[in-house]
């Protein structure tokens, strides 16, 4: 049985005081019904790592370098992230693909670095509205996952979480219907079955895109949706914890 994961991607939001308050509220809530993870911006990770050490709430970074160390001004390595307490790293978020030219090859390279460091990669995929309307949503998602499906070894999949985030539902208030999301999640699981049935059964596939407390329960009730990657609604404790509590 896959345990649900609710992950908050803070994106480029918050301040040190807001981060501290948010983490404090999340820790106090002591959520038991699902795994909980937060992805604060880089400058707040070290303090969050101290705050969350020995806590059940997991810490993740929103990005990482493909290189290990050296002359890469502005980059942050996977080892550095692990050093400050991160267990997870987001890869291939649509904002990084669209704004920072993160290609599928870069997504693969980052994922391999993360797995080599014994951390978990949360790999984001999803189609644009235009791609959905032209009937290519599944093709696009398959292409985005193709390199991973071919390159990763079966055992490595235990350190991978997939997040399906349709671009048209991110930050728009427009959520995929539970049926639309379930259909794509089932498709992703069928791709994972190409690696092995065990990988299909055990890999968590999160939904992201305007998840909030009011719609989380019906999304998470779908058989192939294993939790959520939450943007805007992860920035207030009340809304984020409301999403976590929607899991029975
Ligand atoms: O991009 C997202 C999470 O990574 C989703 O963002 P919103 O929840 O703000 O739509």
Image: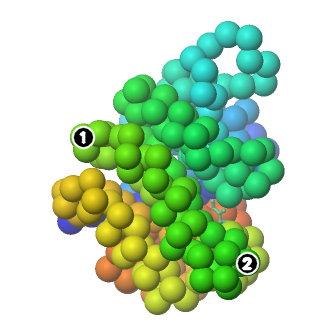
On whether ligand 1 comes within 8 Å of the CB at mark 1, the answer is no
Give the residue number, with chain letter if any, for mark 1.
Answer: 155
Please say if 25 is above or below 17. Answer: below
Percent coordinates x, y for residue 78 in the rendering: 54, 27
Mark 2 or mark 1, whichever is nearer to me: 2
Q: Which tag, 2 or 1, sits closer to the chain's start? A: 2
Q: Name which residue lies at 69% across and 44% down.
A: 102
Q: Secondary structure at mark 2?
A: helix
Against 150, residue 64 (above or below) is: above
10 Å neighbourhood of mark 2: few (<14), some, or many (≥20)?
few
Which residue is drawn at the image coordinates 78% and 24% (left, top)? 74
Where in the figure is residue 25, as x and y percent of width and height? 57, 56
The dot on residue 46 is: none
Q: Whereabouts is ligand 1, in terms of quadrant? A: bottom right
Q: Residues within 10 Å of mark 1 (few under 14, many from 20)?
A: few
> Which picture quadrant has residue 2?
bottom left
- On-image quarter of the N terminus: bottom left
Which residue: 78% across, 44% down? 100
175 and 99: which is toward the camera: 99
Q: Is residue 24 above or below residue 155?
A: below
The residue identified by callout 2 is 130
* Quadrant including the C terminus: bottom left
Residue 66 spot, x, y in % from top left: 60, 28
Viewer-proximal residue, 18 or 217? 217
Q: Is mark 2 within 8 Å of ligand 1?
A: no
């Amino acid at each position: 049985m896959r345990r649900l994961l609710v992950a908050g991607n803070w994106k480029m939001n918050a301040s040190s005081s807001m981060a501290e308050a948010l983490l404090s509220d999340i820790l106090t809530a002591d959520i038991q019904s699902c795994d909980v993870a937060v992805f604060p911006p880089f400058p707040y990770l070290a303090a969050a790592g101290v705050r969350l050490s020995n806590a059940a709430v997991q810490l993740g970074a929103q990005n990482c370098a493909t290189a290990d160390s050296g002359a890469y001004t502005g980059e942050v390595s996977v080892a550095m992230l692990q050093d400050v307490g991160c267990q997870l790293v987001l890869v291939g978020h649509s904002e990084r693909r669209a704004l920072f030219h993160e290609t599928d090859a870069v997504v693969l390279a980052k994922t391999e670095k993360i797995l080599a460091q014994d951390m978990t990669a949360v790999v984001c995929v999803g189609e644009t509205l235009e791609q959905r309307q032209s009937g290519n949503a599944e093709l696009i998602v398959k292409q985005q996952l193709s390199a991973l499906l071919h390159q990763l070894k079966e055992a490595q999949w235990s350190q991978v979480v997939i997040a399906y985030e349709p671009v048209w539902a991110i930050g728009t208030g427009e959520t995929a219907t539970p049926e639309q999301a379930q259909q794509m999640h089932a498709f992703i699981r069928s791709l994972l079955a190409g690696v092995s049935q065990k990988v299909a059964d055990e890999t968590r596939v999160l939904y992201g895109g305007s998840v909030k407390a009011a719609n989380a329960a019906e999304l998470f009730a779908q058989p192939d949706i294993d939790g959520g990657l939450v943007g805007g609604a992860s920035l207030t404790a009340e809304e984020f914890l409301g999403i976590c509590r929607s899991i029975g």
